[in-house]
Image: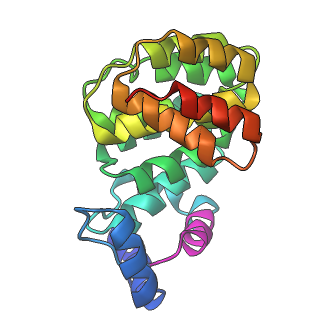
Amino acid sequence: MNKNINEEIRKKLFSLADEKYKKFHSDLCPNVDNIIGVRVPLMRNIAKDISKSEYTEYLSNPYNDYYEEIMIEGLTIGYIKVDNNTRFEYIRNFVPRIYNWGICDSFCSNLKFTKKNMNEVWDFLMNYISSNKEFELRFAIVMMLYFYIVEEYIDKVLEIFNNIHHEGYYVKMAVAWAVSVTYIRFPEKTLEFLKNNNLDKFTYNKALQKIIESLRVSKEDKDLMRSMKIK
């Protein structure tokens, strides 16, 4: 039966393939050569359908030859109605399969159960924050970006970002992106952080650049960020 579910999903994905989108998304995901070319909202619809019916069987052995198949597995984990321990187990099994930023970030954004389980999910993320694997670490950072840049956690989040030392490009970019979001929500705290931190030059300058590019930052603040860049 499981094979049938997987075959049905694969057939559906190829029927929804869009060549122009495949080229566009492939350009955004360098070194990823297994993209069919299906837009995320369409994959969300497939994952929602699975989550309402045969998800136990499906998640026991999903196909993962294509980018979209891995994406649908991740999205399904976010949609199913299960207790936290069961979901954590699914997440634990899925995280090692994350191999690019697109799957990572869509997966994280869909774990909305986090909002009602902040402490439990935070403790779970601590298992990944010291990982030496690029996308395990990005998973933890992006989860913090989506759910933990709030009053109760902002100090902890900035402290964690300050102590991340990983050479992976997608880790550095995640930290830069996250710091730009902390600046928008907590400008004074983040400004103090930017004046005194352990970020490497690349990540620090990227964070400033992302703040400058934001539509939610004033011209004065953007000028300040420009003056703080490290040459």
Res 154 seen here = no
Question: Is 154 or 110 nearer to us in this picture?
Answer: 154
Which residue corresponds to the image point at 48% horizontal and 86% vertical from the top-left? 16
Colour scheme of the rendered structure: rainbow
Indicate yes or no whether the magenta region holds residue 42: yes
Q: Residue 167, position in %: x, y? A: 25, 30
Q: Which residues are magenta?
A: 38-49
Q: Residue 28, position in %: x, y? A: 38, 65
Indicate yes or no whether the magenta region holds residue 64: no
Which residue corresponds to the image point at 48% horizontal and 19% vertical from the top-left? 161
Question: Is 164 or 202 nearer to us in this picture?
Answer: 202
Res 76 seen here = yes
Question: Is 50 or 31 nearer to us in this picture?
Answer: 31
Q: Total marks drawn?
A: 0
Pick the quarter of the image with the N terminus: bottom left
Which residue corresponds to the image point at 53% horizontal and 62% vertical from the top-left? 54
Q: Would you place residue 38 above or below residue 148 in this image?
A: below
Main SS type for the magenta part? Answer: helix
Q: Would you place residue 196 above or below residue 166 in this image?
A: above
168 sits to left or right of 41: left
18 sits to left or right of 157: left
Q: Would you place residue 160 above or below residue 72 in this image?
A: above
Q: Residue 204, position in %: x, y? A: 44, 27
Q: Residue 50, position in %: x, y? A: 56, 65
Q: Quadrant of residue 115?
A: top right
209 sits to left or right of 115: left
Pick the quarter of the image with the C terminus: top left
Q: Quadrant of residue 40?
A: bottom right
Which residue corresponds to the image point at 51% horizontal and 34% vertical from the top-left? 207
